[in-house]
Amino acid sequence: EAQVTQNPRYLITVTGKKLTVTCSQNMNHEYMSWYRQDPGLGLRQIYYSMNVEVTDKGDVPEGYKVSRKEKRNFPLILESPSPNQTSLYFCASSSRDRGSPLHFGNGTRLTVT
Amino acid sequence: GENVEQHPSTLSVQEGDSAVIKCTYSDSASNYFPWYKQELGKRPQLIIDIRSNVGEKKDQRIAVTLNKTAKHFSLHITETQPEDSAVYFCAADMDTGRRALTFGSGTRLQVQP
């Protein structure tokens, strides 16, 4: 089954404790991206990657890192989480074909205390 | 960068009525406009999209219209059903392959049985 898999689904952590949210897709998509979803703000792009070893900042990259060492994986790293990073995070992927739809993962609800 | 405004933020209709959600965008270079539906606790999923060379597109009870001159586009749902209840997001993209989708803030649609 074609899918984008994120882990974990829920995560509660404390300020400053490094964490990684994993994302993997099995559709051989070139493009992958991370979004955060906050009430009243919609989905905002954090980072994206057009292909292996190619990453770039989205609209809200501060406090986040990503890597794309393999085509299928695109982990999101919070080196020193803060309470304002409490949010619902979605990984997404698509092919580079014009107009191809974004496929979203099931989301990771992160709480930073 | 692109800015997408979406209205209304909440919409309640009676089953069988029509629902209309409107979005405006700021960047005239945007030429791809998808709509995503997010059911409670689930991931966003593409329901329909339109490109700038088309003024209207229909898929069963769902239609999207685009006015490039005015830089606005709308989602129309006819004969609404309770399962249409969800949050709907519009988005705009220059469709260069970067997939820099800018999302609206979302509309919570409630269809009353």
Image: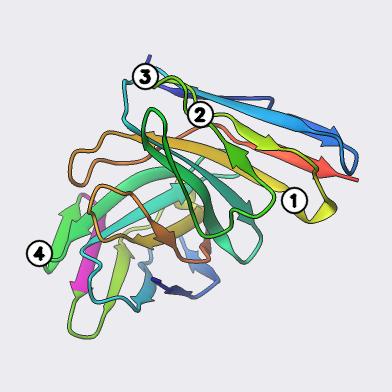
Q: Please, is residue B42 above or below residue A45 in the view?
A: above
**Residue type for callout 1:** Gln
Q: Is residue A66 visible?
A: yes
Q: What residue is shown with label 2?
A: A74
Q: What residue is shown with label 3?
A: A2
Q: Please, is residue B40 above or below residue B79 in the view?
A: above
Nearer the observer: mark 1 or 3; the answer is 1
Chain of residue at mark 4: B
Please tell me whether mark 4 sits on a helix, a strand or a loop. Answer: loop
Q: Are marks 1 and 4 in contact (CB under 8 Å)?
A: no
Q: CA distance from mark 2 to mark 1?
A: 19 Å
Pick whichever of labels 1 and 3 is earlier in the sequence. 3
Q: Main secondary structure of the magenta part?
A: strand
Q: CA distance from mark 1 to mark 4?
A: 39 Å
A9 or A75: nearer the viewer: A75
B112 or B110: nearer the viewer: B110
Q: CA distance from mark 2 to mark 4?
A: 34 Å
Q: CA distance from mark 3 to mark 4?
A: 30 Å
* Residues behind callouts 1 and 4 on a single chain: no
Q: What residue is shown with label 1?
A: A85
Q: What residue is shown with label 4?
A: B54
Q: Residue furthest left?
A: B53
